[in-house]
């Protein structure tokens, strides 16, 4: 029987880690790769039959690729700590590894929850990620919002996993600041610069895309807040890039 290693990257995920581990309890091996959490994440994970690896965080792709190389089994399922594998997706995973139909990886859609509401629009209706894949055929690339790269055939699961990405609004903003800093560093290393277009035009354009073109207004006030925070994320990345280009810490 083909076996699966589930990988859960963590940093201060004490409110999520136990449910995350339970949701991939079907895996033959579970690896928690922790970026030196300062809360009780590791202590809670130690209650379960998991392998815990501590590694200093450099970027998302490097962290996940390192964990993948530690896996014992050919099939990898990567689960962010704020995600939950539903029983329907579990069945699809177990069926896929036994009969992959020449696929080296599989996309899964996510149901996104924001400020206590399931967000159905604003771009979330198009949210899909590769979560199950063959260890030897796929690799993560990209500093932030990393993606799997492969030349092989990819399949698609029918059902969705659940994505509880943000504890509250403050947590959302802190993540936006973190992602913005990482993206700004990537742009800085690529030699990109900033002008008024990036600061004055791109953030409102991002709001317009999420709220109007991607129908965020159908989610009511949470959809409006979601679109505004997406715009804020764009603003942050370019302000931080502007500061990097001026050597301002």
Image (tube, rainbow, N blue to C red):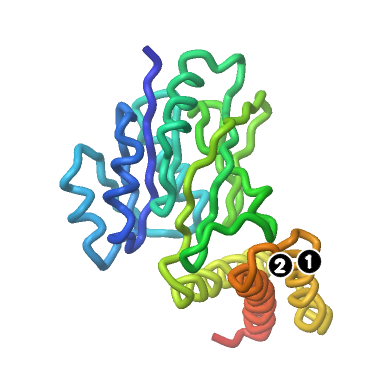
Residue 212 x, y percent position in the rendering: 78, 66
Whether residue 39 is visible: yes
| Numbered label attached to residue 212 | 1
In this rendering, the answer to whether 144 lies above or below 175 is above
Could you say which is closer to the camera, residue 238 or residue 96?
A: 96
Q: Quadrant of the C terminus?
A: bottom right
Q: Residue at x 42, y 38 (%)?
A: 86
Q: Residue at x 61, y 46 (%)?
A: 147
Whether residue 237 is visible: no
Could you say which is closer to the camera, residue 119 or residue 100?
A: 119
Using residue 112 as the reference point, say whether residue 63 is left or right of it: left
Kindly report which numbered mark, 1 or 2, lies closer to the viewer in this rendering: 2
Could you say which is closer to the camera, residue 102 or residue 212?
A: 212
In this rendering, the answer to whether 153 lies above or below 84 is above
| Numbered label attached to residue 128 | none
Could you say which is closer to the camera, residue 9 or residue 24?
A: 24
In which quarter of the view is residue 215 placed? bottom right
Q: Secondary structure at mark 2?
A: helix
Question: How many residues crowd mark 1 within 10 Å: few (<14), some (14–19), many (20+)?
Answer: some
In which quarter of the view is residue 90 placed? top left
Q: Secondary structure at mark 1?
A: helix
Residue 244 x, y percent position in the rendering: 63, 79
Q: Mark 2 and mark 1 in contact (Cβ < 8 Å)?
A: yes
Residue pointed to by mark 2: 217
Q: Quadrant of the N terminus?
A: top left
Residue 73 x, y percent position in the rendering: 38, 24
């Amino acid at each position: 029987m083909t076996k699966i290693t589930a990988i859960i990257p963590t940093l201060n995920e004490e409110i999520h880690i136990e449910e995350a581990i339970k949701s991939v309890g079907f895996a033959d091996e579970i690896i928690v790769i922790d970026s030196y959490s300062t809360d009780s994440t590791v202590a809670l994970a130690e209650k379960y039959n998991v392998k815990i690896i501590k590694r200093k965080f450099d970027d998302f792709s490097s962290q996940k690729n390192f964990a993948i190389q530690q896996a014992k089994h050919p099939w990898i399922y990567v689960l962010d700590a704020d995600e939950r594998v539903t029983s329907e997706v579990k069945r699809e995973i177990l069926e896929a590894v036994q009969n992959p139909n020449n696929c080296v990886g599989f996309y899964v859609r996510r149901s996104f929850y924001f400020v206590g509401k399931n967000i159905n629009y604003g771009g979330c209706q198009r949210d899909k990620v590769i979560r199950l894949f063959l260890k030897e055929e796929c690799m993560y690339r990209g500093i932030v919002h990393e993606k799997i790269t492969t030349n092989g055939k990819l399949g698609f699961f029918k059902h969705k996993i659940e994505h509880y990405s943000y504890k509250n609004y403050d947590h959302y903003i802190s993540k936006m600041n973190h992602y913005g800093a990482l993206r700004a560093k990537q742009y800085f290393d690529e030699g990109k610069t900033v002008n008024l277009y990036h600061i004055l035009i791109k953030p409102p354009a991002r709001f317009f895309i999420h709220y109007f073109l991607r129908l965020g207004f159908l989610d009511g006030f949470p959809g409006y807040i979601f679109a505004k925070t997406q715009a804020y994320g764009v603003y942050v990345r370019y302000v931080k890039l502007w500061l990097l280009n001026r050597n301002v810490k």
